[in-house]
């Protein structure tokens, strides 16, 4: 396992780490992500698979004593995933002009409740974007949760980082939930949450 400290964010005593997680780190990180995103949303095996090739990254934020304060996952989307997302956007009346370009996705991002609002999310987002750009992506997409609780959303953070809104799609995760069987923190087993899909385009 290689773990690399890549930057020290604005909050002092916090470092970001990337690299493939060992089993204990994958378990700890999945627990942090699932606490906010829903029980079973991320499986430990997903995190190992994400980082097994060169197509994905798991970013972790830790304070000096080593406590895990945040995590983010990002990956280069395969052709099928890009086509599926384009279809969904098309049904919402938006044509995504991504022809022939590599598209990356910021999939999950969570900061522990006591550490929010200090810039950790923004720093993990920047590290994820750096990874996707270095992987040859021209676009980065992210589905931001439309939650009743404004703190449970990455929308403002993404817009501040230059992402633009494409469309808001109802019951965005319903099919994923059927396949994976996780529990939405707001809807339980029948997730009806909408997502706002945003995109960031890199200059050529
Ligand atoms: C979204 C999230 C990752 C942002 O992380 P963060 O470290 O608090 O973000 P930053 O400090 O870099 O940026 C702050 C922004 O996050 C939002 N935010 C969320 N909770 C916040 C809090 N307790 N205090 C301050 N800002 C908070 C605000 O919109 C804020 O934007 P603003 O400064 O323009 O008001 C974090 O709030 C979180 O883990 N939320 C729950 C999980 C979640 O919803 N993930 C995204 C699913 S789409």
Image: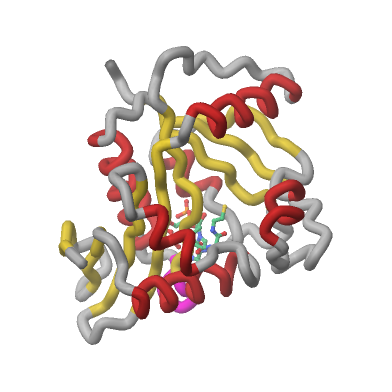
Q: Residue at x 71, y 44 (%)?
A: 172
Give how far across and how far down residue 50 sits, in percent.
Answer: 40, 53
Position above or below: 74 against 63 = above
| Residue 147, quarter of the rendered image | bottom right
| Residue 115 lies in the magenta-colored region | yes
Q: Quadrant of the N terminus?
A: bottom left
Q: Residue at x 63, y 30 (%)?
A: 84
Q: Quadrant of the C terminus?
A: top left
Q: Is 124 in front, or is 85?
A: 85
| Residue 73, quarter of the rendered image | bottom left
Instruction: Tell me: 57 left or right of 174.
Output: left
Position above or below: 184 against 139 = below
Instruction: Tell me: 56 left or right of 8.
Output: right
Q: Residue at x 62, y 68 (%)?
A: 40
Question: What range is drawn magenta here?
Answer: 112-116
Position above or below: 74 against 64 = above
């Amino acid at each position: 396992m290689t773990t690399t400290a890549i930057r020290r964010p604005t909050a002092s005593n916090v470092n970001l780490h990337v690299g493939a997680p060992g089993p204990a780190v994958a378990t700890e990180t999945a627990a942090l992500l699932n606490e906010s995103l829903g029980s079973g949303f991320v499986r430990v095996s997903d995190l190992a698979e994400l980082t097994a090739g060169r197509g994905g990254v798991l970013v972790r934020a830790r304070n000096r004593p080593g406590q895990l304060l945040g995590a983010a996952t990002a990956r280069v989307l395969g052709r099928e995933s890009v086509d599926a997302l384009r279809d969904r956007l098309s049904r919402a009346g938006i044509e995504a002009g991504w022809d022939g370009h590599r598209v990356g996705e910021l999939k999950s991002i969570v900061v522990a409740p006591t550490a929010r609002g200090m810039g950790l999310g923004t720093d993990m987002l920047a590290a994820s974007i750096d990874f996707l750009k270095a992987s040859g992506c021209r676009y980065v997409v992210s589905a931001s949760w439309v939650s009743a609780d404004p703190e449970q959303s990455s929308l403002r953070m993404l817009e501040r980082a230059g992402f633009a809104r494409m469309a808001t799609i109802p019951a965005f995760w319903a099919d994923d939930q059927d396949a994976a069987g996780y529990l939405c923190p707001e809807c339980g087993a029948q997730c009806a949450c909408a997502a706002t899909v945003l995109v960031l385009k890199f200059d050529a």
